[in-house]
Image (cartoon, rainbow, N blue to C red):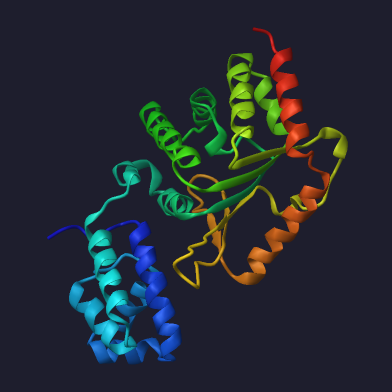
């Protein structure tokens, strides 16, 4: 018997999204649906939320009967369910290092997102890091062995594939202190500055700096964050935005999805944007810094 999936895969989320739309239209309670298809209500709830559970064809058929789904919707759901049950996303083989802090959940969301909006005041975001920078950063953790450091680096570098392999857009604002701190290590600075300049020129990536002379600025009280957004032209009700707040190794990290929570971070982003340099001025500034570094 195949093991129950331990991560929330992309096809599983798609199944949940379609089922949730059907459920909303039906006006039924979850317990009513569960009784009609002879399943426990927690199983139905997991299917609607995209949480790990069995997606047997008979379950999908019964739910489609209850929701009066069209033949096409039924076929799409069964196809996605088979994919969800059999497929394993690339990070599944790295569960030894990504699962303890629920990084597997974040990577799944990141891979499905169509837009990432991020603010960072402490370090270069993982998607923008060079391998050397990531290694230097991860080696500061007292909880990681050298082998685990290298495993984390492989995960981080593999994640960066979405920058060129998908239509995802990334909008990042970095406090200038992030750049200046990385420059303190000359062995890392040259390549990293060149990397940031290269990325900032990509059509789907926007990088901006908040300069030192902005002083103390509003919007930073919430700390670093990422807003993940999902759009699907095929689905009329795409997934709601999710705010990801990294709380540190072993702390579990936060995934915020309530409208008022997301709105709070959107307001913070708007405040930070007011003092950030334009993308063009940022690229000029990064290029200037890179040229000034010793070769």
- In the rendered structure, the answer to whether residue 273 lies left or right of residue 69 reads right
Which residue is at a point 46% across and 42% down the rendered structure image? 162
Res. 96 image quadrant: top left
User: Quadrant of the image for the N terminus?
Assistant: bottom left
Outermost residue toward the left in this view: 1
Task: Give the quadrant of the C terminus.
Answer: top right
Please identify the quarter of the rendering in which residue 165 is found.
top left
- Nearest the eye: 91 or 245: 91
Q: Position of residue 49 (x, y in %)?
A: 40, 71
| Residue occupying the point 30% across, 87% down | 34
Location of residue 18 with respect to 142 vertically, above or below: below
Q: Nearer the viewer, residue 1 or 235?
A: 235
The mark tally for this picture is: 0
Residue toward you, 211 or 43: 211
Evaluate whether residue 8 shows in this view. no
Residue 220 seen in render: yes
Where in the figure is residue 276, as x and y percent of width and height?
79, 42
What residue is rendered at 60% in x and 27% in y?
A: 198
What x and y, as percent, mark residue 255?
A: 53, 60
């Amino acid at each position: 018997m195949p093991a129950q999936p331990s991560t929330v895969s992309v096809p599983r989320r798609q199944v949940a999204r379609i089922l949730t739309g059907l459920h909303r239209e039906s006006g039924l309670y979850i317990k009513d649906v569960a009784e009609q298809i002879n399943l426990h209500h927690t199983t139905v709830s997991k299917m609607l939320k995209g949480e790990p559970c069995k997606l047997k064809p008979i379950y999908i058929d019964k739910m489609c009967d209850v929701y009066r789904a069209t033949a096409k919707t039924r076929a799409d759901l069964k196809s996605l369910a088979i994919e969800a049950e059999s497929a394993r996303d690339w990070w599944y083989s790295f569960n030894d290092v990504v699962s303890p802090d629920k990084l597997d959940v974040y990577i799944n969301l990141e891979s499905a997102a169509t837009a990432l909006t991020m603010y960072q005041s402490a370090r270069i975001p993982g998607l923008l890091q060079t391998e050397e920078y990531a290694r230097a950063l991860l080696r500061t953790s007292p909880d990681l062995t050298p082998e685990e450091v290298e495993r984390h680096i492989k995960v981080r570098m593999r994640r960066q594939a979405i920058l060129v392999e998908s239509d995802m857009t990334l909008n990042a604002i970095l406090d200038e202190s992030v750049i200046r701190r990385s420059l303190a290590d000359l062995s890392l600075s040259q390549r990293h500055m060149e990397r940031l300049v290269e990325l900032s020129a990509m059509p789907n990536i926007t990088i901006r700096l908040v300069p030192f002379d902005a002083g103390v600025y509003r919007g930073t009280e919430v700390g670093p964050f990422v807003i993940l957004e999902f759009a699907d032209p095929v689905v009329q009700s795409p997934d709601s935005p999710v705010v990801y707040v990294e709380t540190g190794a072993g702390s579990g990290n936060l995934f915020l999805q309530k409208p008022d929570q997301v709105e709070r971070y959107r307001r913070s982003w708007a405040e930070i944007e007011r003092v950030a340099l334009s993308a063009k001025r940022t690229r000029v500034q990064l290029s200037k810094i890179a040229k000034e570094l010793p070769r």
